Image: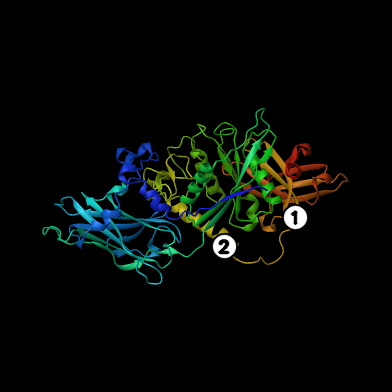
Amino acid sequence: MSRDKLSSSSPRALAWALALCSPSFACTSDEVSADSGADEADESGESGEESGGEEEEQLVIGPPAVGIDIVEVEANQGTGVAISAGAAWIPADERNAYLVRNRDTLLRVQYSVAEGWEPREIIAQLHLETPDGERLEPRVQALTVEADSDPRKLATSFYFPIYADEALPGTKYWIELRESGEEAGPASLAEGVNASPADFAEIGYESTTLEMKVMLVPIDYTYLAEPTSVDLSEDDLALFEAELLQQNPLQSVEFTVHEPIEYDTQLTNLGTLLGVMSALRSEEQAEANVYYHALLNIRAPALSHVAGIAQLNDASKEAALGRVAATVYYKYEEDAPAGGSARTFVHEVGHNQGLRHVYCPNAATEAAGTDPAYPHDGGKIGVYGFGIRSAQLYSPTGSHDYMTYCANSWVSDWTWNKTFARIETLTSWDYEGAAEGEAAAEVPLLWGLISPDGSEQWMSFRGPAPHPEQLSAKQRILASDGQGGQRESLAVVSPLSDDASEVIIAPLELDLDEIDALTRVDWRGEQHAIDLARVERRDRALSAAR
């Protein structure tokens, strides 16, 4: 089987991204909400000019700066985390979100200036101390300070990259502001909070290993008179990888591109591909923490008004068959990036991670099954977001959580923390050693999709027997063997991301060839005959495709 792999390793990628945001290469944003007002429309990734080369050699670092106070130091790996306020260090248990070890970090310094301030150059120095006590060469930035910093504009604050190989548990920081030149600042200005924290303190990186593995499965859709396929370029893959990496608390994400899978039956419901993915991962005995994700090209941005769909499940190994999703792959122009599809992909993976929709009042389509626990009004992200690959800055009030249906999407601190827990659990399975006990026996499985309009689609394939605790009497399957015998199977019932459809997976005691009638019994006791002739035999289809 031909497969290509991508990883997220990109040494000094943050420095490269920030370099693109120099004044001569302004990083403007089209990710700003139209309802955020004119002052929000400048949420660009514009950066200040970080001194370097010959200019840095000419800098003269003077005495402590006067008339300027450090207000806040923020560490941002995707979502903003205040690590000190004024001169006070903020301990980890008082912070809003986790910081991930071995992940690029942007450190931003916000400041205020005293009354009577006249613009002049100020030098900021970031001092880092490694976990073993080594002091690194200070990072220096000179900035002409005209007024209070504006957190909406990267150019008005001091900022520094901390690279992934420096972002370690126990790494400490200390920031100071200095006058530029040998002379002291104006005598009329008093010395304020020109250092933060008061002494070296830990940045606060967690020790947790956080990784993801994604299997992208292009679909060759041969039902159409002119069949379609998904032609993933290296740029497309890089875009999908960057979108997922930037908005999830990860050290790395591994993408594998599967060989294309043919599907020759008419598709009217994108959810049908979830069964195809479940059958495929079962046949390939995929690891429980791999996400299988179908990509379908139908020459349109959506299938029956649906651009993506996913199965919601818990964080158990037994839920592995449900770590499946599907996204419509579409480009408005042939040479354009597949940005919309990449964002949908991240959204659907979020559902696989157990996330429900987030309510947004300005969405063109109302999201079903929203999470009432979401803390930020209107689906806003609540704190500043930052792309560690794009160097894009996202406004707390101009951007929406990526689980909304609103534009200007990014990750909130709330979603960051929820996915941290899920990723931590699934990653741990790769490091726990050999599993105890025997693997679940393979049995015939009946997979069904029950849609809101009452329509049903059914598939069969072999796979691991569900754990007894997963089975529910909410849906039951009756199988008649043609000799007067009838076998009853409880089923695993899982909701889909539309909060209206359900997937049913029932273990059968007999192979499908030994069954002459199937009936679904719902929670009301009502019986629904299943047409055996229309049960798609995915095990046979996959074997034929091989």
Amino acid type, mark 2:
Ser
Percent x, y for residue 401? 44, 46
Q: In this view of the protein, can residue 491 be seen by the observer? A: no
Q: Name the quarter where the C terminus is drawn.
A: top right
Closest to the observer, 524 or 91: 91
Left or right, residue 42 beside residue 224: left
Observer-nearest of 36 and 200: 200
| Left or right, 123 with reference to 278 | left
Q: Secondary structure at mark 2?
A: helix
Residue 371 picture location, percent across and down: 49, 48
Say which residue appears at 37% left-offset and 70% top-offset: 134
Quadrant of the image occupied by residue 277: top right
Q: Position of residue 237 (x, y in %)?
A: 53, 44
CA–CA distance between discs 2 and 1?
A: 25 Å
Residue 6 image position (x, y, % from top left): 55, 50
Q: Residue at left 65%, top 40%?
A: 272
- Which numbered disc, 2 or 1, marks the residue that appears first in the sequence? 2
Label 1 SS: strand
Residue extending farthest to the right is 483
Residue designated by label 2: 428
- Residue 408: numbered disc: none
